[in-house]
Amino acid sequence: MEKNVIRKAVLALREEMKTEEIEEKSQKIMSRLREMVLFQQSLVIMTYVGFGSEVATLPFIAESLALGKRVVVPVCMPKSKELLISEIKDPKLDLQPQGRIGLLEPPKERLSVIDPQEIDLILMPGIAFDRQGGRVGYGAGYYDRFLASFKKCPLLVALSFDCQLVEAVPVEKHDIPVDWIITENEMIPAT
């Protein structure tokens, strides 16, 4: 299936979930993530800030900071279509609604840009994933360009609800597969 067809179908499924269901399933996903030795050993974690019907990450961000981990979040730069990576220390101060859709990102005065090469683990957003690590994102290519900049890519873990798993994602040569997919019911090593 074409990526746009997958995007539309899976987004429709995800949007059917109620807030309580998203929160409950997100907690299960984050519990599985915390069990991973790879998470436990990571010092610098990059995570997206869940928005709308995405896996909720805010409680995980606060917990990771309390564990003494460094947490960084992406900041979208629409003009250049690039991601800046900014460290956050206090989600209440460092994350505020930005842009036309209100994504939670650090405002300009709170930016604390770090070198992406310091990152040990990246939690990947997406709309759909397959068991081989294929990913359908939102279509702007921010993460594809960002991941291509690494000399050695950190561990990539997709956070996904079961309804986001599909049989196969069309893969293009610039696509970088994720290493793991964590859902509310499974921890899937990409094969």
Image (tube, grey):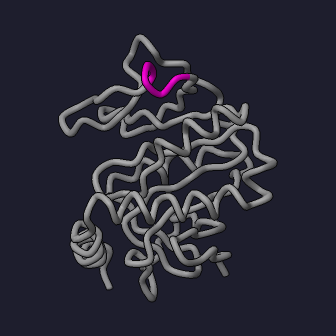
x then y, percent, for residue 151:
72, 46
Task: Give the answer, above or below, for where 81 lies relative to 154.
Answer: above
What are the residue bounds of the magenta stretch? 90-94
In the image: residue 49, left or right of residue 64: left
Task: Give the answer, above or below, for where 186 lies relative to 38.
Answer: below
Q: Main secondary structure of the magenta part?
A: helix
Q: Is residue 162 visible?
A: yes
Quadrant in which residue 182 is drawn: bottom right
Residue 71 falls within the magenta-colored stretch: no
In the image, 184 versus 1, the foreground residue is 184
Question: How many labels sit on residues?
Answer: 0
Q: Residue at x 42, y 24 (%)?
A: 106
Q: Residue at x 42, y 47 (%)?
A: 142
x then y, percent, for residue 67:
71, 36
In the image: residue 142, left or right of residue 70: left
Quarter of the figure with the C terminus: bottom right
Task: Give the answer, above or below, for where 79 lies relative to 121.
Answer: above
Q: Is residue 174 visible?
A: no
In the image: residue 103, left or right of residue 84: left
Q: Residue at x 36, y 40 (%)?
A: 81
Quadrant in which residue 181 is drawn: bottom right
In the image, 19 versus 69, the foreground residue is 19
x then y, percent, for residue 186:
59, 77
Q: Residue furthest left?
A: 100
Quarter of the figure with the N terminus: bottom left
In the image, 173 versus 6, the foreground residue is 6
Q: Residue furthest top?
A: 109
Residue 93 falls within the magenta-colored stretch: yes
In the image, 80 versus 88, the foreground residue is 88
Q: Residue at x 41, y 11 (%)?
A: 109
